[in-house]
Image (tube, grey):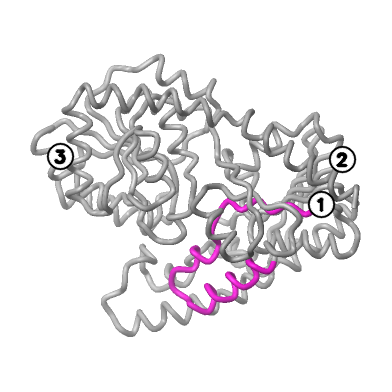
Amino acid sequence: MKTLLIATQLDYTYFANTRTHHMVEQFIGRFSKITVLHKAHPTGNTLKEKIRSFFTINIKERQKTPCSIIEVSPLFNAQNGLGVSLLGLGNPYALPPSIFKRILRRVFSSMGFVLELAILPSFILAYLIKDRGRYDVFIGGGVWAMALGYLLKKTGRVKLLVVDDYDYSPGSQPISRFRQWYTNLIEILMLKRSDLVFSVGALLAGLRMEQTGKHVEVIPNGVNCALFKKSAGVKSAHGPTLIYVGAVEGWSGLDITIDALKEVRQRIPDIKLLVIGHGPDRYTEELKGLVHSNSLDDNVEFLGIKKYSELPAYMGRADIGLAMYMPIELRKYAFSLKVIEYMSAGLPVIATTETQSGVLVESAEVGMAVEYEPRALARAILRLLEDKEFYKECSERASKTSAEYDWKSIMERCYSLIESSYGSLAGD
């Protein structure tokens, strides 16, 4: 078992802290050759650049010894929610007031399947142009990455087909039932055809076993404990502060967090919220408008994207980590990296009930899991900030529990399972 090909629909270059990054970091030295083939994040600042990017296939290769990285910008590469953006809507999960816009919203979303159908041929083309190698192990993340692995295995170019099941893909289609249907169909088919499946959490693993009848291994997301422990050890002087790190999307829960701050501020006037991350400009502006209309300008800071190495310093300025995700299927099954990173930094976490994040927070007793509504969130914030003994217990348990999720030990188990499956395959 010497060669490994990883294909992912997340941009390995644009996003600096994905599961794939930690997988590669821990597998270097275990494989003599590692290739990462990934879909590029849509680019272009001007309209002309965006149009050119949309109608061309761009394939790049760069070496990062001992890892080779192939970046694919497929034909029709566009950000998710393009139709929503064209209609001037910020949040795809909120119904537009106009019936006409509701109809167009659903039509545009259904048309998105044309854009998605270009991903697999673009992946195949990139493989044929830049690689053509044979691999002992293929790990695929995302529906079309799984499909690439299946085709390579059928043509004898891959021996062991592994699915890294880090997301419930149909959940990323909140508007079009047609796209939900075919995404679900392809995803289940690929899972059934794989040799080994890793699901990111127990909720998703349970769903996959129900869908496929196959055994599924749980390989959760992890944390660089050495990096984030710095936050727990060195706290900078600050007032009561909440922090959200991640995508600034309609499902992030930042809208209800801003609503909750109105109630919290009545008892804690100097409460602060730090928002670190990126998202659609229109939705970010909606959130800033909500902040301003509630006279919370002095309480909320939008800090934009920060380097992964800088996150511990910001968490050192905070007291509570937020994972108040909208309880939709996409977030219900997600095992948020940030929850473990908050915990490693010694931050109690507030998460939404009946999500994987909420299950972790409740079972480990590292904070509070509450209903997805502003008043419940406000009560949880006040409980943690005003009950010092409860806060201390949650903080200590968070720091201790996070050690169980160190990336090194998680990927050690991941490699052992791959090695065992490969051995079984070779023995058949």
Where does the image place residue 301, in percent across and percent down from the top left? 30, 38
Residue at the (41%, 30%) spot, across then down: 343
Determine which residue is flagged by label 3. 264
Judged from this view, the residue extending furthest toward the left is 266
> Of callouts 2 and 3, which one flags the residue occurring earlier in the amino acid sequence?
2
Q: Between residue 246 and residue 159, name the one nearer to us.
A: 159
19 displayed left or right of 336: right
277 displayed left or right of 62: left
Residue at the (17%, 52%) spot, across then down: 293
Asked if residue 165 lies in the magenta stretch, the reply is: yes
Looking at the rendered image, the disc whose residue lies closer to the viewer, 2 or 3, is: 2
Above or below residue 212? Residue 375 is above
Which portion, as a residue range, is magenta? Answer: 161-189
Q: Residue 160, which numbered label?
A: 1
Judged from this view, the residue extending furthest toward the top is 233
147 displayed left or right of 3: left
Amino acid type, mark 1: Leu
Residue at the (80%, 40%) spot, across then down: 34
Asked if residue 48 lies in the magenta stretch, the reply is: no
Where does the image place residue 262, in percent across and percent down from the top left? 14, 45
Q: Residue 1, which numbered label?
A: 2
**Real-space Cα separation, disc 2 to disc 3, in angstroms:** 56 Å
Question: Quarter holding the N terminus?
Answer: top right
